[in-house]
Amino acid sequence: MATTTAPGAAPQEVRPRPARPRTFSGIKPSGEPHLGTYLGAVKRWVEMQDEYDNFFCIVDLHAVTVPQDPAALRRRTRELAAFYVAAGIDTAKSTILVQGHVPAHAELGWILNCITPMGWLERMTQFKDKSAKEGDNRERISAGLFDYPVLMAADILLYDARYVPVGDDQRQHVELTRDIAERFNRLYGETLVVPEAVIAETGARIMGLEDPTQKMSKSEDLPGQAIGVFDNPGVIRRNVMRATTDSGREVRFDPSRPGIYNLLTIYEVLSGESRPAIEARFEGKGYGDFKRALADLVLDVLTPIQERSRQLLTSGEVDDILRQGAERAAPVAGATLLRVKRAMGLA
């Protein structure tokens, strides 16, 4: 077996590459999954899973950077796993795992902390935005909230992921992961794969229904902002019909009209139709006609996902899927962790 070395580094084996390029991505179980979660992440994962060796994670350790109700966290973790499968993730092609079920995530996170400058983390815009909400009360901001981008880097790097399918708001985190991997490789020799972000041209950032200038999310302040994956049909239809548009009537893709543009983007990603075809379909029709058609389309997609999710949860099949996922992920993650520890002299 060939080896690679760097000044001051111990020789290390060159790792075998997976047969297909590997991907890693994950979602926090800190809130209810919504249509933005499906369109911006899970739907894309389903469509690309034949091309790659996939690890799709439920990042529960990231969720606890802010306070969580333990029972709700357990429930949401199982629901998110069921949602992955019900939406089309095939466990014969992809590995579904819970981050906290594979201890190597936390261990590599600590190791990478020790080579990551604080200045890199201070520049992260999501931390700035979240901490700004606390004002001068810095005592309420956890060290984990400041540091979680390093754990995210560990998540990705553990699996030798070449590609990371994420929304546009996560681009900076993948760039940080690249910086950390490159720094480690300079210090200790070629050890970690440097990943690339994969961001969809359409649907990577689905905006809210009440305030289309803000990303879709479940919010107590804006209860109609999101379409929840597990919302009942009446709530889904009502939220679509009440969605913000503008004073015009023409149904067309116009970025200067964020409300109707966002709803049309949702229709585009769900239907797979081209923009000219969608505009032709609704030519001469008003917003009411379009919204009714959009609500029907959303329900056509989400209803079977809801039904399959319920089956997975009530049968207990989801627990078997997560146990098997951890068993498949642990050896892959462990091999990377051992390689890192040997490079640093920790093993």
Image (spheres, helix red, strand yellow):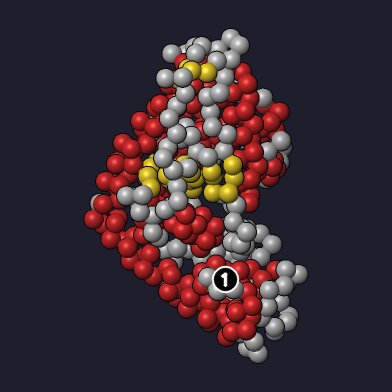
Residue at the (61%, 69%) spot, across then down = 265
Q: Is residue 14 above or below residue 140?
A: above
Residue beneath disc 1: 268
Taking the spot 54% from the left edge, 43% from the top edge, the residue there is 163
Q: Please determine whether, in this image, residue 287 is positioned above or below residue 138.
A: below
Q: Which kind of residue does numbered mark 1 sit on?
A: Glu
Judged from this view, the residue extending furthest toward the front is: 2
Q: Which residue sits at x=62%, y=28%?
A: 182
Query: Dot 1: few (<14), some (14–19), or many (≥20) neighbours within 10 Å?
Result: some
Q: Is residue 255 visible?
A: yes
Q: Position of residue 132 (x, y in %)?
A: 70, 43
Residue found at the far right of this picture: 256
| Residue 267 in sight in this render | no
Picture layout, residue 29 above or below residue 145: below
Q: Quadrant of the N terminus?
A: top left
Q: Residue 323 in the image: state x and y as whole percent.
A: 29, 41
- Tell me the SS state at disc 1: helix
Q: Where is residue 335 drawn, in percent x and y?
A: 40, 26
Picture layout, residue 266 above or below residue 339: below
Occupied quadrant, residue 232: bottom left
44 lies left or right of 221: left
- Return the residue nearer the eye: 96 or 94: 94
Image quarter (top left, top right, bottom left or bottom right) of the C terminus: top left
Tell me residue 108's x, y (percent). 49, 26
Q: Is residue 323 left or right of residue 69?
A: left
Q: Looking at the image, which residue is at 55% across and 12% down?
A: 9
